[in-house]
Amino acid sequence: MTATQPQTTQANAQTRYEVRRGDLPLSCPLPSMGLWNSHPRVYLPIEADGGEADCPYCGAHFVLVD
C-alpha cells in the first residue's frame, strides 16, 4: 500500500496560466507547483499590470480572468 501524495502541477510546464482573484497574491511558481526544479518564488503585481503579468525568471504569462 502506498501513501497518497498531495497533487501538484509541474512547475513551468505551461507558458500561459489563467488565475482568479482568489489566487492573489500571485506568485511564480504557483503554490500548487512542485518546487524542486524551479526558480525562486517571485510575486507578480498582476492587478497593477492591467490583469496580465510575466514571470521574469521563466517567462510564464499569467492572465487574471475574473
Image (spheres, rainbow, N blue to C red):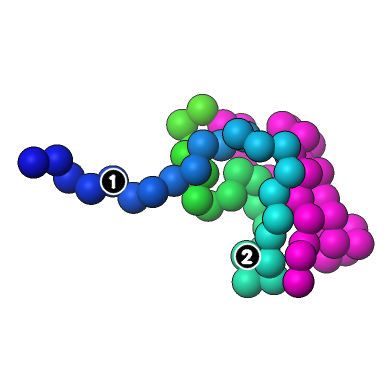
Q: Is residue 24 above or below residue 7?
A: below
Question: For the C terminus, which image quadrant?
Answer: bottom right
Q: Is residue 66 left or right of residue 30?
A: right
Q: Would you identify the image quadrant in which residue 50 lies? A: bottom right
**Amino acid marked by disc 1:** Gln
Q: Quadrant of residue 46?
A: bottom right
Residue pointed to by mark 2? 23
Query: Chief secondary structure of the magenta span?
Result: loop
Residue located farthest toward the right when viewing the structure as drawn = 50
What is the three-letter code of the residue carrying label 2?
Asp
Please give the residue where the numbered disc 1 appears in the rendered image: 5
The residue at 56%/37% (across/down) is: 11
Answer few, some or many: residues within 10 Å of disc 2's Cα (few below 14, many 20 plus, some between 14 and 19): few
Residue under the image location 69 percent in, 71 percent down: 21
As measured in the structure, the alpha-carbon distance from the residue carrying label 2 to the one carrying label 1 is: 22 Å
Tell me the quadrant of the picture where the N terminus can be found.
Answer: top left
State whether residue 38 is above or below residue 55. above
Residue 45 placement (x, y as % from top left):
80, 58
